[in-house]
Image (cartoon, rainbow, N blue to C red):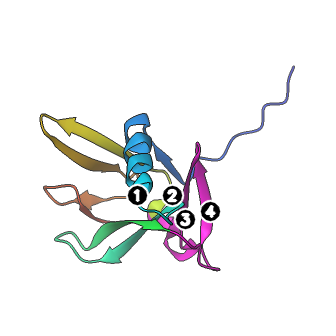
Amino acid sequence: MANNPIQPTPVITLTHNAQQHFERVLATQPNAVAIRVGVKLSGCSGKSYVLLPADTRLPCEAAVVSGPLQIWVDPAQLPALQGLEIDCIQDGLNQRIVFNNPNAKGTCGCGESFTD
C-alpha cells in the first residue's frame, strides 16, 4: 500500500482562463514578471482584492506559483487568501475577474469585496 501524504491546499489557484488573461497582461508590461495579489480595506463589504503586475518581489512577499505564472503575496494577507481561486469570465464583449474565496463570509453584489 502506497503512502499518500495529504497535499496542502494551494494558497491561490488560477483557472486556465485566468492564467491566460494574466499572461496577456504581463506581456503588455515590459518589466513585469508576476502578479501581486492582496487585499485592502475598502469596498462595500470591508475588503477588496488587489491585482497588480509586479517587477520586483518585496523581501516580505511569499511566492506562490500557479503553473508558469508567479503570484506574489504578503504573508500577513495569506489567511484571507488561503484557498482563493481566481477565474476570468468572458461575457459577450465583456471580461471580468471572479474571486472564489472559501474564507469569505459575505460578499457584495458585484463580488469585488468581501468580509472574512
Q: Please report whichever mark, 3 or 4, sits nearer to the chain's N-terminal start.
A: 4
Residues in magenta, as a range: 55-80
Q: Cβ–Cβ below 8 Å for labels 2 and 4?
A: no
Viewer-proximal residue, 105 or 87? 87
The residue most toward the top is 1
Q: Which residue is mark 4?
A: 63
Q: Please report whichever mark, 1 or 4, sits nearer to the chain's N-terminal start.
A: 4
Which residue lies at the image location 31% right of the left edge and 43% below the top edge? Answer: 88
Disc 1 residue type? Asn
Residue 107 image point, x, y percent = 23, 59
Disc 4 residue type? Ala
Label for residue 82? Answer: 2
Residue 2 image point, x, y percent = 85, 23
Q: Cβ–Cβ below 8 Å for labels 3 and 4?
A: yes
Residue 35 image point, x, y percent = 47, 61
Label 2 and label 1: CA atoms lie apart by 7 Å
Q: Secondary structure at mark 2?
A: loop
Query: In the rendered image, which quarter is residue 41 located in?
Result: bottom left
Which is more foreground, mark 1 or mark 3?
Answer: 3
Q: Is residue 32 left or right of residue 86?
A: right
| Quarter containing the C terminus | bottom left
Q: On screen, 108 above or below 102?
A: below
Viewer-proximal residue, 56 or 71? 56
Label 3 and label 4: CA atoms lie apart by 5 Å
Label for residue 72? Answer: 3
Which residue lies at the image location 17% right of the left edge and 60% below the top edge? Answer: 108
